[in-house]
Structure formats: C-alpha cells, structure tokens
Image: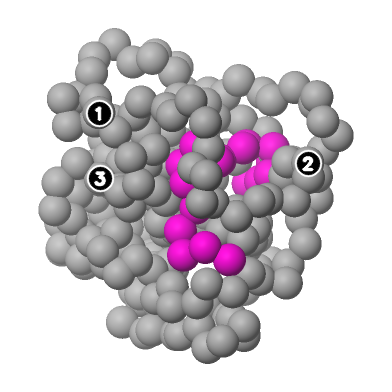
Amino acid sequence: MKIEYVSGSNIVSLMPRRNDMHFPALKTVEAYWEGLRNGRPVPARSEIDPRGMQSALEYAFILERIALGVARFRLAGMHLTDLMGMEVRGMPLTAMFVPESRAKISEALEAVFETPQITVITLKAERGIGRGAMDAQLLLCPLKSDLGDVNRVLGCIQSKGEIGRQPRRFEVVDVQSRPLLSDNPTEQSFATTPAGTPVPAGFAEAKKAYEDHTAKGADKAEAAPHAAAPQRPKGKPVLRLIKAEE
C-alpha cells in the first residue's frame, strides 16, 4: 500500500501516475469532494449535490458502513449496474471483487473510515469466456453522517475496456492512500450554478422497500447545518443525478 501525505497547505497528488484520460471521472469526483471539504477534514453526506459532479454521476456511488470493514451501496450510478449486470443498491462493495481481494477491500474501507483517509485502488477484472481484459480504478472519499460519525463514502469506479459477459468482478492491483492531516482549504475552484437551478431527483436517496435497523438512526437529516461548519462559497457545484429503480 502506498501512502502520500498532506503537508501544510500543499496537497501532494494522490495519484501521480493516474492517467486522467483513462479515468477522468475519478478526478472529477475527487475535486468535488475536496471543494466540499473546504478546509475541514471530512465533509458531510448531506452536503452532496449531484450538480457538482455532473459528468461523473454514472460512475459515482454512496456507501454506508454497516459493520467492521463492510459497507453497502446506498446509491450507485449506471456504470456499476452495467459492470454487475444487476442493481447494486443494498449490496456490499466487496460483491464486486473476487474472493481473494475482498480482505484488501475491507481493510481499505476500514482505513478510510477510521483514519480517515482518501484512497484510490487500481483494479483489473478477472478474465474468462466472454470477459476480456479490463482495467479500472476505484476512489473512496470519507463522509460524515448527520450525527457526525464518519460512516459514509463518496466513491467512484471507472473501467477501461469492453465489459463483455456480466458480472465483472475485480482483483486489487495497488492501493494508494492519503491520510487527511491538513485543515487547510485547497486552491481548486469549481463551477457553480445560479441560485434556484432545479436539482435532478436521482442522486437523492429514495425510500426503499425495507429499512436496515443499523441505518435507521444515521439517516435522519438535521433541520439546520452545523453551526461550527465553515461557510461555503455562494452557489452550488454543478451536477446530474442518477436514480436507482426501486
């Protein structure tokens, strides 16, 4: 596992070798998350506005921690459905991986929640009949619940290559992490939309057919933002949403 650190106001690139031409969605989601952070260690789940990462929504997802090293999909873009050949909402993240790599994913998830840290995982898909070579990268960015616990993840997975026969499951090739040691805001700027622009109703969490008892208390939205939270710039980042069918 490779770890890169933050020093003062200088943020070291998380993935200096990442080819943004192959995986541009990861760059978009990471930049949006950094903008939400705005000098804080971890932003809140309630701050996510799909308009801020519009071009990456089909690759984006929200995870909820339900046990040690286990997180399930609360929301997921269509690219994940295409990879698995089924709706992934409610499934654990480890379902997208071969058995040999699931312990590594659980370890990486737990570090994202506990450190907290931002992590990028390089992947390759298992091959077989109707399943050609395919590379992918996975981004995991921590989020706080409305109760203040770091138990959510804003993530992104993007692949390169033909999907072929589904489901496609992945092996872990490399893990790179950056502990969040700085409270200094980044110098990145983000596009905003005029006030009053309607938000697409797809990345907001819809009511599900069943309720998980573990998630009941953590999903209640607070009536007002935390008083100690730093003020965000006027306007909201631009985004498109993806709605998971019930």
Quadrant in which the C terminus is drawn: top left
Q: Which residue is mark 1?
A: 217
- The reply to whether callout 3 and callout 1 are in contact (CB within 8 Å) is no
Which residues make up the magenta segment? 39-56
Return the mark for residue 65.
3
**What percent of the width, then of the height, locates residue 228?**
51, 51
Q: Nearer the viewer, residue 126 or 71?
A: 71
Return the mark for residue 235.
2
Image position of 23 with respect to 216: above or below: below
Return the mark for residue 6.
none
**What percent of the width, then of the height, locates residue 167?**
33, 40
Queried whether the magenta region covers residue 174, the answer comes back as: no
Label 1: state its secondary structure: helix
Residue at point 34% right, 66% down? 116
Q: Could you tell which of marks 1 and 2 lies nearer the N-terminus?
A: 1
Residue at point 60% right, 20% down? 201
| Res. 75 image quadrant | top left
The Cα–Cα distance between marks 3 and 1, rounded to whole angstroms, is 13 Å
The Cα–Cα distance between marks 1 and 2, rounded to whole angstroms, is 30 Å
Residue that protrudes farthest toward the right in the picture: 194
The mark closer to the camera, 3 or 2, is 2
Image position of 189 with respect to 236: above or below: below
